[in-house]
Image (tube, helix red, strand yellow):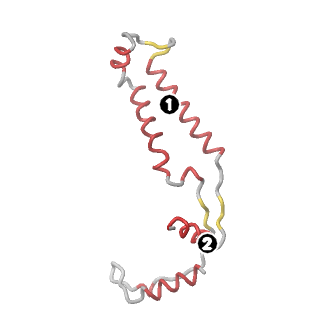
């Protein structure tokens, strides 16, 4: 089915020119090789992870001391909270988040080899 579609595309495109003034006739249709769907966390990665990146950058800024004046003023000029400096707290929260992310990656190992036609079926489902 996929080879048939590819050949139909090639036939329909035969009169068109590629950007480099080459014809679509030079395109070779090859047998498809195994295709693996990536883990779920890789699907629409930026949409899912941008908040996590923002929080990570904010924690790194906090660890570098960017919020020291603000936090000290907001908490009555205290330099520590629970016996820890603010820099240490930001660093610890960042490391905990990084460890959690790595743990997620180790647990979510759901790479699947797709059978012939599965990829086209997924594409068609996303379009509808």
Could you say where residue 78 lies in the image, as x and y percent from the top left?
A: 40, 10
Identify the element where label 1 is drawn: helix
Above or below — where is 99 with respect to 1?
Answer: above
Q: Is residue 117 left or right of residue 60?
A: right
Give the tally of numbered discs: 2
Above or below — where is 91 with respect to 106?
Answer: above
What is the spatial separation of the Cα atoms under label 1 and label 2, in whole angstroms?
41 Å
Above or below — where is 49 with respect to 4?
Answer: above
* Residue ID for mark 2: 33
Q: Is residue 33 left or right of residue 78?
A: right
The structure residue drawn at horizontal position 45% and vertical position 16%, both measured from the top left corner, is: 85
Within-10-Å neighbours for mark 1: few <14, some 14–19, many 20+? many
Within-10-Å neighbours for mark 2: few <14, some 14–19, many 20+? few
> Which mark is in front, 1 or 2?
1
The N terminus: image quadrant: bottom right
* Residue ID for mark 1: 94
The structure residue drawn at horizontal position 37% and vertical position 84%, both measured from the top left corner, is: 22
Asked if labels 2 and 1 touch by Cβ distance under 8 angstroms, the answer is: no
97 or 128: nearer the viewer: 128
Could you say where residue 53 lies in the image, as x and y percent from the top left?
A: 45, 40
Identify the element where label 2 is drawn: loop
Above or below — where is 75 with respect to 62?
Answer: above
Q: Is residue 22 left or right of residue 125?
A: left
Could you say where residue 77 lies in the image, as x and y percent from the top left?
A: 36, 10
Mark 1 and mark 2 lie on one chain; the one further toward the N terminus is 2
The structure residue drawn at horizontal position 64% and vertical position 44%, both measured from the top left corner, is: 106
Could you say where residue 3 lies in the image, as x and y percent from the top left?
A: 58, 82
């Amino acid at each position: 089915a996929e080879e048939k579609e590819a050949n139909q595309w090639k036939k329909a495109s035969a009169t068109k020119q590629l950007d480099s003034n080459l014809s679509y006739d030079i395109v070779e249709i090859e047998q498809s090789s195994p295709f693996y769907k990536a883990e779920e966390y890789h699907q629409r990665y930026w949409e899912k992870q941008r908040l996590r990146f923002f929080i990570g950058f904010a924690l790194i800024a906090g660890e570098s001391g960017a919020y020291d004046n603000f936090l000290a003023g907001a908490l009555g000029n205290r330099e520590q909270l629970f016996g820890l400096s603010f820099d240490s707290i930001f660093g610890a929260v960042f490391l905990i988040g990084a460890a959690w992310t790595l743990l997620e990656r180790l647990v979510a190992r759901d790479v699947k080899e797709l059978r012939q036609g599965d990829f086209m079926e997924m594409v068609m489902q996303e379009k509808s």
